[in-house]
Image (cartoon, rainbow, N blue to C red):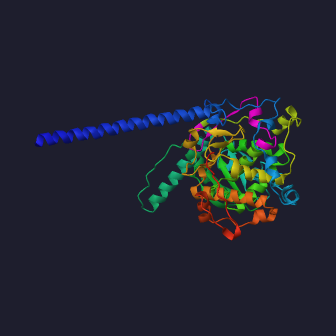
């Protein structure tokens, strides 16, 4: 009996080991498939970057634009029909023009002066070949005078490794001497050879120590963040807070792309600034708080204007490919396609003759934007892509790279990284987003003024969650309608 029991036990152990081995192999195969899928996506082998045509139900080729076809003629958003049944405030367009028609931005000369100061300091404390470049909302055409300034320090990786390796060894030697003087046990050296991220972290630490000597006050230093950065307050200048990163090159191309869109249509910038102001006032903007970022809201507005107002896809119009090597969101190096037509090239090649937009004001476009997101956008399925603005449907790729929730979410494609920008969106913030969008539509079609629209109090989280689950509430006289936000 004992031998029989021992044989059964041995068989059980072998079965468990075999099961674990099979599970490990299955996980390894799955990991290889996901990695292969990611590589194909980044190289563009997945036609359309994982997007499906909503009506065709098939994989699309890379989106292209036929210059002989009027882009507005293929769209299916009847904004003019929507406007027939609503009564917008009579002063909405004039108020928008007065408040957002000519919003001042940072003085380019002040930005250039500050960039030069940072570049000179970086050449002394990091490497002589450093060059500084501004990016972000302060220079992409969608910023204000109060916008933070982002600056990239670009340099050759071999130079960065060379100089930061010396700094790293010098710091380790100083720490060792300090431990010996205090008769402490020397700390274990965890990394003597730098990699790409640790070299950038070392450079950020150098900037944290050196830039205060050049008229900057250190606010925070994040050398071990996903993208190492350091934030300073410009004491000698007038630019406020400045974020400095190392070799984070992709935002430079995003900035150039958005700057072109801000100049291609005189209604893009006012509408983007207005929508971002509304989103910030209603607590649905800001990646740090689990909301969609300001950059994502800009992409969403441009996408809507591409659908209804004749704004072209500058990426689809480009003829020559431009590839950029950089680190992706998950820390892996990839080749990204940063191909698009600049606004100058667009005016010289396409001109304004083919632009057939809506004959309405920015106020009507504002209502159409919120109406589209609240009632027409297919939550959980549709991808907003300014690269291919054709109301495309997402496939399984977006469930892998984006943030999934129990309720249908929102999908917004980064035009260059081709990742889902909803990855920062929390579930409670998704509920808030849907509830605020629904209320915005009701307020606008009810005839509210611009000040009332922007200054209304944000809804509570509980009301937003109840709204997402189909319950009815009446906060302060406002009744949220029951609507199906899921796929239709």
For the N terminus, give its image quadrant: top left
Specify whether 347 is left or right of 371: right
At x 72% / y 43%, what residue is drawn?
254
Q: Nearer the viewer, residue 349 or 54?
A: 54
**Residue 135 showing in the rendered view:** no
**Residue 62 showing in the rendered view:** yes
The picture quadrant where one finds residue 53 is: top right
Outermost left residue: 1
Q: Nearer the viewer, residue 384 or 473?
A: 473
Residue 422 lies, in percent from the top left, at 62, 49
At x 58% / y 53%, what residue is drawn?
223
Residue 142 position (above or below residue 449): above
The stretch of residues the image draws in magenta is: 306-333
For the C terminus, give its image quadrant: top right
Outermost front residue: 85
- The magenta stretch spans residue 208: no
Residue 135 lies, in percent from the top left, at 73, 48
The picture quadrant where one finds residue 57 is: top right
- The magenta stretch spans residue 312: yes
Residue 431 lies, in percent from the top left, at 61, 57
At x 77% / y 36%, what residue is drawn?
74
Outermost bottom residue: 476
The picture quadrant where one finds residue 86 is: bottom right
Tell how many labels.
Answer: 0
Q: Nearer the viewer, residue 354 or 40?
A: 354
Specify whether 266 is left or right of 182: right
């Amino acid at each position: 009996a004992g031998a029989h029991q021992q044989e059964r036990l041995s068989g059980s152990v072998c079965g468990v080991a075999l099961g674990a081995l099979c599970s490990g192999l299955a996980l390894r195969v799955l990991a290889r498939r996901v990695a292969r899928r990611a590589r194909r996506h980044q190289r563009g082998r997945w036609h359309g970057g994982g997007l499906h045509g909503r009506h065709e139900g098939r994989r699309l080729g890379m989106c292209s634009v036929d210059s002989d076809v009027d882009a507005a003629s293929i769209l299916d958003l009847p904004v003019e029909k929507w406007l027939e049944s609503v009564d917008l405030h009579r002063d909405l367009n004039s108020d928008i023009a007065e408040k957002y028609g000519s919003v001042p931005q940072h003085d380019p000369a002040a930005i250039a002066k500050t960039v030069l100061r940072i570049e000179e300091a970086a050449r002394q404390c990091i490497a002589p070949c450093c060059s500084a470049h501004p990016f972000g909302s302060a220079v992409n055409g969608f910023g204000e005078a109060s916008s933070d300034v982002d600056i990239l320090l670009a340099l050759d990786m071999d130079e960065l490794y060379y100089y930061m390796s010396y700094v790293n060894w010098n710091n380790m030697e100083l720490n060792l001497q300090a431990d010996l003087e205090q008769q402490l046990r020397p700390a274990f050296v965890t990394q003597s050879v730098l990699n790409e991220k640790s070299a950038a972290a070392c450079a950020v630490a150098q900037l944290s120590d050196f830039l205060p000597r050049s008229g900057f006050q250190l606010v925070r230093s994040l050398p071990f963040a996903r993208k190492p950065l350091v934030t300073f307050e410009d004491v000698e200048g007038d630019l406020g807070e400045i974020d400095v990163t190392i070799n984070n090159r992709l935002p430079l191309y995003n900035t150039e792309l958005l700057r072109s869109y801000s100049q291609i249509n005189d209604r893009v910038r006012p509408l983007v600034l207005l929508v971002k102001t509304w989103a910030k006032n209603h607590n649905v903007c800001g990646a740090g708080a689990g909301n969609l970022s300001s950059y994502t809201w800009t992409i969403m507005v441009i996408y809507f204007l591409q659908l209804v107002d004749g704004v072209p896809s500058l990426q689809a119009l480009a003829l020559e490919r431009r590839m950029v090597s950089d680190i992706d969101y998950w820390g892996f190096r990839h080749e990204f396609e940063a191909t698009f037509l600049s606004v100058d090239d667009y005016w010289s090649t396409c001109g304004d003759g083919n632009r057939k937009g809506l004959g309405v004001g920015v106020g009507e476009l504002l209502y159409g934007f919120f109406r589209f997101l609240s009632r027409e956008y297919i939550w959980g399925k549709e991808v907003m892509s300014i690269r291919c603005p054709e109301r495309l449907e997402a496939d399984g790729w977006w469930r892998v790279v984006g943030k999934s929730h129990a309720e249908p979410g929102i999908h917004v494609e980064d035009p260059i990284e081709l990742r889902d920008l909803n990855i920062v969106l929390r579930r409670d913030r998704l509920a808030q987003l849907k509830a605020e969008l629904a209320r915005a539509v009701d307020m606008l079609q009810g005839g509210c003024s611009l000040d009332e629209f922007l200054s209304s109090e944000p809804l509570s989280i509980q009301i937003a969650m109840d709204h997402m689950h189909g319950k009815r509430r009446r906060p302060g006289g406002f009744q949220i309608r029951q609507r199906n936000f899921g796929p239709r």
